[in-house]
Amino acid sequence: MADDNVQSFRVGDVEVLRIVEWRGPYVPAGALVPDCGPEVWSAHEEELVPDHREPGGDRAVVALQTWVVRSGGRTVLVDTGVGNGRERPGNPLFHQREGDFLDRLERAGIRPQDVDVVVNTHLHGDHVGWNTRNADGVWVPSFPGARYLLPAADDHHFGPEGGYAGGVRVDDRLVYEDSVAPVHRAGQAVVWDGEYRIDEHLVLEAAPGHTPGSSVLRLASRGERAVFVGDLLHSPVQILHPECSSCFCLDPRQAAATRLRVLERAADERALVVPAHFGGAGAVEVRKEKGGFALNRWAV
């Protein structure tokens, strides 16, 4: 495709498209993945610069993006980015952002009414923003015919029953009220727990740690596999050092254990690992090496 913000690849009979909402240097790498010291980032400079760490600087390069999966005649969106016009006082990058994400979807041939399923791997603000749009001052679902699949543990934790994640961050309440609650009110929310099968190729599985309800989406078709891991990974450095969790993980120890388990299976099955935020190539095959993992093949 000519659009640099859209790339695609196939997994068996299933087409996968990457729609980038925003990409660029973000926060210092050591702040994003604090468990990895400066020596770790320096040791892996060849694998990380320039796509995942800025040249001549210290900031991690990340992307806000949605993965579109066309499977069995359905169009499935995996995470929906930040969205427009959101009050996010805790994050200047997300606060009152205005972009052309829906136009980018349409240029890739995906109209809002064409979307059948929306998967939110977890309910952080950069994964649910385009769940909704502002229609004359009211937040309504962006995709009127879609089922929105919400992990039950996150729906409880970030919703009113969980006190909007205990009220620690004001953004959590705002995110739920403008990007999740409207989907419930519209009757389009499907709250799931443990495992949820979408179709013959796609199944959601719980993968807690980053948030209580974090999940992965597994794809299998004609002997080929991929796993969409959400925020289990923010940088390839976490594949090379899976014990390192991001600053956004609510339970870093559990996130590390989940990450190790998911990477072990991905390596054994030769599944593409598809994270939510890699700034350069967005999907990678991993292999086992010297008791750990190495980067094997990039897809896009």
Image (cartoon, rainbow, N blue to C red):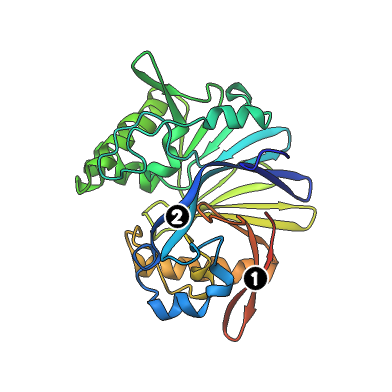
Q: Is residue 145 left or right of residue 83?
A: right
Q: Position of residue 85 (x, y in %)?
A: 36, 28
Q: Amino acid at mark 2?
A: Pro
Q: Is residue 178 above or below residue 229?
A: above
Mark 2 vs mark 1, foreground winner is 2
In the drawing, what numbered circle is on residue 25?
2
Label 2 residue SS? strand
Q: Position of residue 246 (x, y in %)?
A: 38, 63
Q: Position of residue 128 (x, y in %)?
A: 43, 38
Q: Is residue 11 above or below residue 113?
A: below
Contact (Cβ within 8 Å) of mark 2 with mark 1: no
In the drawing, what numbered circle is on residue 267?
1
Asked whether residue 115 appears in the rendered view, the answer is no
Q: Measuring 72% from the left and 38% from the top, which residue is drawn there?
A: 2
Residue located farthest toward the top when viewing the structure as drawn: 136
Label 1 residue SS? helix
Quarter of the image for residue 46 reads bottom right
Q: Measuring 38% from the left and 34% from the top, which residue is drawn there?
A: 97
Q: Amino acid at mark 1?
A: Ala
Residue located farthest toward the left when viewing the structure as drawn: 167
Quarter of the image for residue 283 reads bottom right
Q: Measuring 49% from the left and 38% from the top, which residue is drawn there?
A: 80
**Image quadrant where one finds the C terminus:** bottom right
Residue located farthest toward the front when viewing the structure as drawn: 56
Mark closer to the chain start, 2 or 1 = 2
Q: Nearer the viewer, residue 239 or 3?
A: 3
Q: Is residue 144 left or right of residue 200?
A: left
Report, in whole angstroms, how far the alpha carbon at label 2 lies from the one at label 1. Answer: 29 Å
